[in-house]
Image (spheres, rainbow, N blue to C red):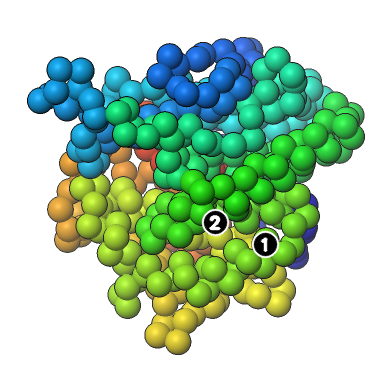
Amino acid sequence: MIQYEKKYRIMPDWDNREWIMEKAQTAMKAPVLHITDVLSPRSEGGPHDYYSNGDYWWPDPDTPDGLPYIQRDGQSNPSNFNSHRIIMRQMRTNVVFLTSGYLLTGKSAFAEKAVQHLKEFFLDEETYMAPHLSYAQAILGICPGRGIGIIDTLHLVDVVFAIEKLKDSSFMKLEIYKGLKKWFATYLGWMLTDENGIQEMNKDNNHGVCFFVQAAAFALFTDNERIADFCRQHYKNQLLKQEAEDGSFPRELGRTKPYNYSIFVVDNMVSLCHLLSTPHVNLWEYETENGRGIKKALDFITPYILDKNRWPYPPDVMHFDAFPARSGFMLLAGCSLGRKELLELYHRLPEESTDEEARRNIASRQPMLWM
């Protein structure tokens, strides 16, 4: 992975070691999960192909078989197939906390278990996940998969940081490390060239932002500086166009969950600044000619996460009470920009939300691994 020196105005200690170790011990006892454990009869792919349904799509009550599905923005259909999403996120969570346990204690058993999760999920012939998302967020009766589905692998960004932290473990054999790099290089190539990936790349809302968070992380992990620089230029020349002059993101404010999505897009814009800033290209300080940049985005959202009662827009149609939840951007931006109010909020909020929607929308379970 390409490493750049990062200057933090505030360097935090690991937050709540006792809680982290509890999570690490739980992960030690957890079963090793694989995409191949569950196959949806609705999927047009095979047992190694990731599959999910679009969140906000429901059976049409006016047709005998419910097809084609119709959209209810912001309202998640609990009957949709989410097993692969849950498996992927649980794998990520197990790997992240096992790696954290290894770093905090030096005990090799944590590293051994983390590497087992990675090897079986990504590499083993019988259980690997194919490095593409052709069948993600399918809509029944309309399409077998969509570019929008690429957001499902946002949680894998945590995983590449964990892999790097496990490099010095005797259990991260060279062939496993190379195999993982090859998997992510192949997946990145698919993202950048497949029709679904190209569609997602060009989205002018949080989906486009999340595409580039993944592309940046996977490019850096696989030593692809050309694509990393492509991501930097896209951030400056395209993604910041989503931001209004006041620092808000109008496409997110126009959704039925404007509070959730406004926080979510800032979280991921911060991730890009963290991933892509170098001694020569500091995205934390970058502003367009009309003043758009990450500082202005943080200036907009921070008052509303510090005091939700000040939120002047409609409340979210679902899960409004679940936010704000502890998010990585509070730690990353708090340290890099010296914003103590964000660090204090990060430490004040519960370690993890009990709300599934909040957990689903938090890209990083352990941002300390990013630092």
* Residue at figure coordinates x 28%, y 64% from the top left: 250
Q: Determine contact: label 1, label 2, CB under 8 Å.
A: no
Q: CA distance from mark 1 to mark 2?
A: 9 Å
Residue 37 image-quadrant placement: top right
Question: Circle 2 is placed at which residue position?
Answer: 212
| 110 relative position to 60: left or right | right
Q: Nearer the viewer, residue 106 or 186?
A: 186
Give the x, y percent position of residue 5: 75, 65
Residue type for callout 2: Phe
Q: Earlier in the sequence, mark 1 or mark 2?
A: 2
| Residue drawn at point x = 77 percent, y = 40 percent | 182
Q: Residue furthest bottom?
A: 289
- Quadrant in the rendering for residue 342: bottom left
Quick one: 138 or 143, which is closer to the camera? 143
Find residue 36 and report its horizontal and vertical position in percent: 59, 16
Picture residue at 47% right of the left edge, 70% below the top? 238
Residue named by callout 1: 228
**189 relative to 77 in the view: left or right:** right
Q: Regarding mark 1 in the picture, which secondary structure is present there? A: helix
Residue at horizontal 54%, vertical 77%? 286
Q: Is residue 198 visible?
A: yes
Can residue 300 be seen at all in this image of the molecule?
Answer: no
Depth check: give the residue in front, 114 or 214.
214
- 193, above or below 39, in the image: below
Figure check: 210 above or below 61? below
Q: Picture quarter containing residue 162?
A: top right
Q: Amino acid at mark 1?
A: Ala
